[in-house]
Amino acid sequence: MFQGFAPIDFDTFHIEGLEQRMEAIQSRIQPKFQAIGEALVDDLSVLTGQEMHVHIAKHARRTVNPPKDTWMAFCHNKRGYKQHPHFQVGLFDDHLFVWLAYIYELPEKKRMAKQIRQQQALLEEVLGDEDVLSFDHMKKESVRAKDLTSKDLKNHLLRFERVKKAELLIGRHYSPQDETVQDGDKLLAAIKATYTQLLPIYKLTVGLPV
């Protein structure tokens, strides 16, 4: 049963050393990702109309620098998620993120970016006041949807379409102290609600009826 995330989970990213931090990620955080995956994968499969699969970041390529964040992903592709639109849950030391993610590895990023740009009105309709957007999954920074004008959003979407390394992540950030984060049932409900809200954008880009 998923119990939510505790402050010690976020403190994992203050542990010095790759081996020591990875050990804490594997023992503290990854079992919780597994529990989130088991709790939500069937619901997400029904919502999307696709069989979804759970992927938990292994950070296998790292040899020196310990990861600054860690995450799990839901994707229709069983073998990998980075080359497809996918849903994420993850942690930095100062927040939990819940994303619909389009990252630079997407082979069809340009096409998908153009689709979203051409349907900006749909994106604006979907976005709520508490939602945030990021344009680089490696960085903590995000912008609040309510702080963006239509022109700002258009410029970000153009950059996402034209710049190879530009990304688009849409969703929510939660503080480690947020009651939702520390309550498993509330967090699962919040994650599912965010994914449901963003479903029209996901469906648009993967060719499902919106």
Image (tube, rainbow, N blue to C red):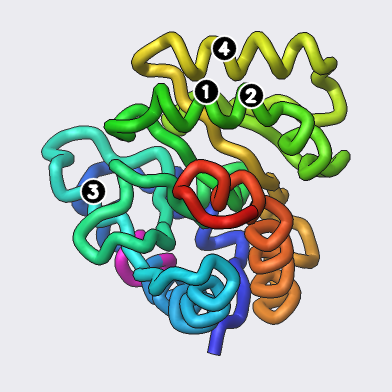
Mark number displayed over residue 114 = 1
Lower position in the chain sequence, tag 4 or tag 1? 1
Q: Nearer the viewer, mark 1 or mark 3?
A: 1
Q: Which residue is mark 4?
A: 158
Q: Is residue 127 above or below residue 199?
A: above
**How far across and how far down the image is residue 78, in percent?**
25, 65
Amino acid type at circle 4 is Leu
Q: Is residue 63 above or below residue 149?
A: below
Q: Which residue is mark 3?
A: 59
Determine the CA span between mark 4 and mark 2: 10 Å
Q: Which residues are magenta?
A: 24-29
Q: Nearer the viewer, mark 3 or mark 4?
A: 4
The residue positioned 66% from the left and 51% from the top of the image is 200
Determine the CA span between mark 1 and mark 2: 6 Å
Q: Nearer the viewer, mark 2 or mark 3?
A: 2
Amino acid type at circle 1 is Lys
Determine the CA span between mark 4 and mark 1: 8 Å
The residue positioned 73% from the left and 56% from the top of the image is 197
In this rendering, position of residue 107 left or right of residue 12: left
User: Is residue 40 something one can see in this rendering?
Assistant: yes
Determine the CA span between mark 3 and mark 4: 31 Å
User: Is residue 24 something one can see in this rendering?
Assistant: no
Q: In terms of secondary structure, what is the magenta stretch mainly?
A: helix
**Which element type, helix, strand or loop, lies under badge 3?**
loop
Determine the CA span between mark 1 and mark 3: 31 Å
